[in-house]
Amino acid sequence: MKARFTPALFAHAEAVLGQLLRFDHPADAVVSRYFREHRQLGHADRAFVAETVFAVLRRGRSLEARCGEPISDRRLLLVALAVTRGWSQRELAPVLRANEEEWLAAAKAKPEADLAPAVRCDLPDWLYNRLEAQFGAEETLKLAQAVNLPAPLDLRVNTLKTSREALLERLADEGISAVAGPLSPTAVRLREKPALAKHALFLEGAFEVQDEGSQLLGYLLEPKRGEAVVDFCAGAGGKTLLLGALMKNTGRLYAFDVSDKRLAKLKPRLARSGLSNVHPARIEHERDTKIKRLAGKVDRVLVDAPCSGLGTLRRNPDLKWRQSEESVAELTVKQAAILDAAAKMVRPGGRVVYATCSLLTAENDAIVDAFLASHPDFTLTPASAVLAKHGIALDGDLLRLLPHQHNTDGFFAAVLDKKA
Ligand SMILES: C[S@@+](CC[C@H](N)C(=O)[O-])C[C@H]1O[C@@H](n2cnc3c(N)ncnc32)[C@H](O)[C@@H]1O
């Protein structure tokens, strides 16, 4: 159902955008809080507000260039509706003032090619420069265009409870159109975005929401029945749940994180999943005694490292404005320290997978290169060979998923095996 476009609805979008552009908190948290405080907004109204303000976060730089002075939240929203969502002046009529018609037509007509490359890509200069150095101008434009579109909704089937085929059948019975994901054996991609939080299939643990790319990290770690496995940066446990299922609910799976708040979100997910082999525990930092106690005893460690998150711009477009060269530099120090601590945990013949959802070499290749140079007892196992064993066809020694090539979030991963 489409929202009725009224000045009152537009005012909600303006209010949310005003809060978002302060960049004090993650955008999804700001939007959720606003909706909790404005319960009168129905599903269609919320979808309108969220999609419109996210369009401004995604395309803010080029929208500002089109807007011209003075820039205001109102003008940004109008240009966003006209340019990124293709609304005509007739559709905008309930809100558009007579003295704005000419300005909006000119803003919309500005040729894309007239914009400077970083503006056209809607990226801050520092980020554009880094991506351009890594990918070249043409590829960076394609990447930027892909991350500026909303992500599809992907599910991961919980193989402890059902199979992908059975889940697809049940979704079809319920009128939810879905297909098997092309990469991950457990991925299901929905054609639309129905509300799922109260759905019976969700409540009974048949699936979790998880990007298809993120699922591949589990297949790179390849945890086996009965093993001791560590999810070093488990957060709310997106990957923990997959690892537990791959272990067929046997062995011991430690879910560590420094954040109590994130680990608390794992609890209800664990309850739904049917897993009983997971041991969540908060650690102070990567040198915590809980980590040291496991030195040399663990078969596999997943390091889903804290990172800039720039691979998830489709979902978190505010990150490109919230991150900076300085924040990335700080993260790389943390990433190297966590990978180092993880390496100490594995037994000879064991495996560490280092992963990020970043697009930047500094957080990815550079960390792995430095690690291999200082850890001669570890070798890089080609990711393509590991994935091929699970029927996943992707080239390359390192996993590099890119939104414009794979239609997943951007992910990087390296399989680091300790010599036996
Ligand atoms: C990319 S997120 C993890 C996402 C999670 N694996 C999932 O699939 O939902 C990175 C996590 O690292 C945690 N973290 C930050 N510093 C850490 C440290 N020194 N040791 C362990 N975890 C840390 C953060 O709290 C955050 O939850």
Image (cartoon, rainbow, N blue to C red):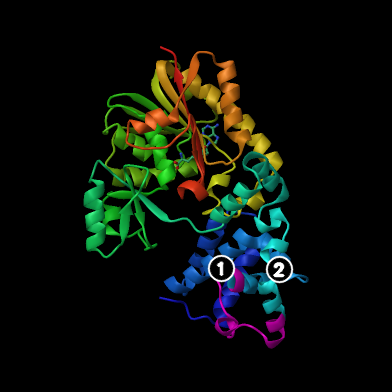
Disc 1 CB within 8 Å of nearest ligand 1 atom? no
Q: Nearer the viewer, residue 7 or 105?
A: 105
Q: Can the viewer see residue 121?
A: yes
Mark linked to residue 79: none
The Cα–Cα distance between marks 1 and 2, rounded to whole angstroms, is 17 Å
Give the residue type that dot 1 points to. Thr
Q: Secondary structure at mark 2?
A: helix
Q: Are marks 1 and 2 in contact (CB under 8 Å)?
A: no
Residue 98 magenta-highlighted: yes
* Badge 1 density bin: few <14, some 14–19, many ≥20, Cα 10 Å: many
Q: Secondary structure at mark 1?
A: helix
Q: Residue at x 49, y 65 (%)?
A: 36
Quick check: 127 above or below 121?
above
Q: Residue at x 54, y 77 (%)?
A: 9
Location of the N terminus by quadrant is: bottom left
Mark linked to residue 66: 2
Q: Nearer the viewer, residue 1 or 415?
A: 415
The magenta region covers: 82-102
Q: Residue at x 57, y 73 (%)?
A: 12
Q: Can the viewer see residue 237?
A: no
Q: Position of residue 14 (x, y in %)?
A: 62, 71
Q: Residue at x 40, y 43 (%)?
A: 266
Q: Which quadrant of the view contains residue 244? A: top left
Give the residue pinned by disc 1: 52
Q: Position of residue 327 (x, y in %)?
A: 67, 40
Give the residue type that dot 2 points to. Arg
Disc 2 CB within 8 Å of nearest ligand 1 atom? no
* Badge 2 density bin: few <14, some 14–19, many ≥20, Cα 10 Å: many
